[in-house]
Image (cartoon, grey):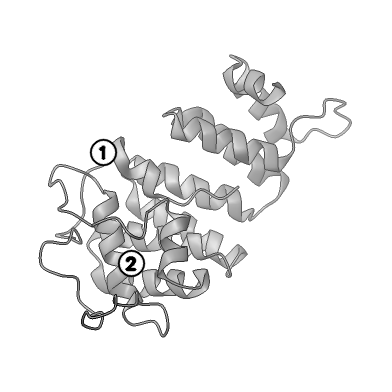
């Protein structure tokens, strides 16, 4: 209930400023960093990117290099189409938490959108490896492992199908990570099948329609 009130309070920007100041002797005890991370993710998923950004920035004032804040700020920048800035945030987050598979998967998404297929594949492979396999990596991004990739909407910024196709392509080069073929079928191949949604074709303009749901938000 308290978190819900904070989320909808009109005074949230001022509260974030108080946290950012970190004034000594302040008696007010605001939400913890973990609570702010949760609130920020909730705000971002509902499209309130500016308010979410205020919360994530306030976390950095408390703990410099907080991987949660850096990763989530990267997500906000990616949703705004600032791909280079998003990648810089992900890189900093990865330095703060090198074992987090989700951060690497976000790096892969940013690189894919920037048209850097080679580095996107490397980051996706690292994410799959850290996650423990393809299915676990897809779960981190809210993807169902058994869902067909389908064709990408050419007007979309990024969608589930192309991210799934990218992960499958990267997993083919990770030992024990590629999906096992069903009984009586051929072995999994390293390249996505014709008609899968992995496309790069250079940088793209931002469209938040589906992108927020295929990013990894760190709580």
Question: Label 2, on which residue?
Answer: 167
Q: Nearer the viewer, residue 115 or 146?
A: 146
Q: Which image quadrant is residue 10 in?
A: top right
On screen, residue 190 above or below 149: below
Name the element at disc 2.
helix
Residue 8 numbered tag: none
Residue 14 in view, yes or no: no
Q: Is mark 1 on a helix, strand or loop?
A: loop
Q: Is residue 110 above or below residue 191?
A: above
Measured as percent of width and height from the top left, residue 16 is found at 64, 29
Q: Is residue 180 left or right of residue 22?
A: left
- Precedes in sequence: disc 1 or disc 2: 2
- Split into 4 quadrants, where in the image is the N terminus? top right
Q: Distance between the residues labelled 1 and 2?
A: 21 Å
The one nearer the camera, 97 or 82, is: 97
Q: In which quarter of the image is residue 96?
A: bottom right
Disc 2 crowd, CA 10 A, few/some/many (<14, 14-19, 20+): many
Q: Is residue 80 in sight in this rendering?
A: yes
At 33% from the left edge and 82% from the top edge, which residue is drawn?
A: 173
Rendered residue at 17%/62% (across/down):
196
Q: Where is residue 219 in the image (x, y as percent from the top left)?
A: 60, 47
| Residue under the point 53% across and 38% down | 41
Up the image or down, 73 lies above or below 89; here it is above
Choose top left, top right, bottom left or bottom right for residue 126: bottom left
Q: Which residue carries the number 1 mark?
A: 207
Query: Percent x, y for residue 99?
Result: 58, 69
Q: Percent from the top left, x then y, of residue 52?
A: 52, 33
């Amino acid at each position: 209930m308290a978190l819900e009130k904070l989320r909808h309070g009109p005074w949230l920007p001022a509260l974030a400023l108080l946290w950012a100041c970190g004034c000594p002797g302040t008696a007010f005890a605001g939400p913890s960093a973990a609570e702010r991370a949760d609130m920020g993710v909730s705000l971002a998923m509902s499209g309130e990117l500016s308010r979410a950004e205020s919360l994530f920035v306030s976390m950095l004032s408390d703990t410099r290099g907080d991987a949660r804040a850096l990763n989530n700020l990267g997500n906000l920048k990616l949703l705004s189409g600032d791909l280079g800035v998003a990648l810089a945030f992900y890189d900093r987050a990865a330095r703060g938490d090198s074992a987090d598979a989700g951060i690497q998967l976000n790096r892969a998404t940013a690189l894919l959108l920037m048209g850097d297929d080679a580095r996107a594949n490397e980051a996706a492979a690292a994410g799959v490896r850290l996650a423990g396999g393809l299915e676990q990596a897809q779960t981190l991004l809210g993807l169902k492992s058994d869902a067909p990739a389908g064709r990408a909407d050419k007007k979309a910024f990024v969608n589930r199908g192309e991210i799934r196709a990218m992960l499958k392509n990267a997993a083919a080069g990770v030992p024990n990570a590629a999906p096992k073929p069903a009984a009586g079928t051929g072995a999994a191949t390293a390249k996505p099948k014709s008609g899968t949604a992995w496309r790069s074709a250079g940088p793209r303009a931002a469209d938040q329609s589906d992108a927020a749901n295929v990013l990894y938000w760190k709580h």
